[in-house]
Image (spheres, coloured by chain):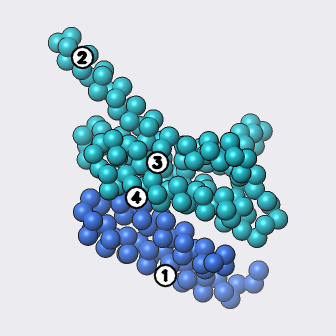
Chain colours: A blue, B cyan
Amino acid sequence: MTTHLGLMVIFALFVSIVFAVLTRDEPRQQVLFGAQLFGGFVGAGILIGWLLYPLPL
Amino acid sequence: MRAAAADRVQATSTTYLICAVAWFIPGAGHLWLGRPQKGIVFLVTLTLMFAFGLWLEGRLFPFEITQPLVILAAIADLGIGLPYVVAKGLGVGAGRVVAITYEYGNTFVIVAGLLNMLVVLDAFDIAKGRK
């Protein structure tokens, strides 16, 4: 659970829940928007991770 | 005319009281304003996020005037309200710099505080009748 990916997924989950509940009033809308945010955060994290992969550290 | 002004002052002071309560207990502002679903979600999620950050050995930053960035982190930490006070009281949040999860923990703790500040602003808007 304390891998970089695992922590990123947990972080994305917390932030998505708060933003979705903050910006939407209907439970269905909250779930849909929360899922979109979560997918966006995780997808963007993985994409950026792969883009940075060839760069030397 | 004077009664209307007095009502306005009372409404304003109630709004700021709601904001203070919303800051001190995450989600309490929404509970006060009759939005229990949102209030409970904020209470559980933000408290859990803060506790998770401390479990990851994140640090509650001190108010050091000589280090402006540390002060900003301390303000963000304080944004969570009561959980911060409880953590300080229990003596957790010292942070262990050599822990592999130290920076992750800091991120969770800081973002939990910042998100609670957003929640307070939302409660302010609701109290003002803007939402």
**Mark 2 or mark 4, whichever is nearer to me:** 4
For label 3, the residue is B26
| Labelled pair 2, 4 in contact (Cβ < 8 Å) | no
Q: Amino acid at mark 2?
A: Ala
Residue under disc 4 on the same chain as residue under disc 3: yes
Q: Earlier in the sequence, mark 4 or mark 3?
A: 3
Q: CA distance from mark 4 to mark 1?
A: 24 Å
**What residue is disc 1 on?**
A43
Read off the chain for label 3.
B
Q: Are marks 3 and 1 in contact (CB under 8 Å)?
A: no
Residue at which label 2 appears: B5
Q: Position of residue B18 (x, y in %)?
A: 38, 36
**Circle 1 — which element?**
helix
Answer with the quarter of the image where residue B81 lies. Answer: top right
Measured Cα–Cα span from mark 2 to mark 3:
31 Å
- Marker disc for residue B41: 4
Which amino acid lies under the numbered mark 1 shown in the image of this protein? Answer: Gly
Q: Residues within 10 Å of mark 3 (few under 14, many from 20)?
A: many
Query: Alpha-carbon neighbours of circle 2 within 10 Å: few (<14), some, or many (≥20)?
Result: few
Q: CA distance from mark 1 to mark 2?
A: 53 Å
Q: Earlier in the sequence, mark 2 or mark 4?
A: 2
Frontmost residue, B24 versus A24: B24
Few, some or many residues within 10 Å of mark 4 (<14, 14–19, 20+): some
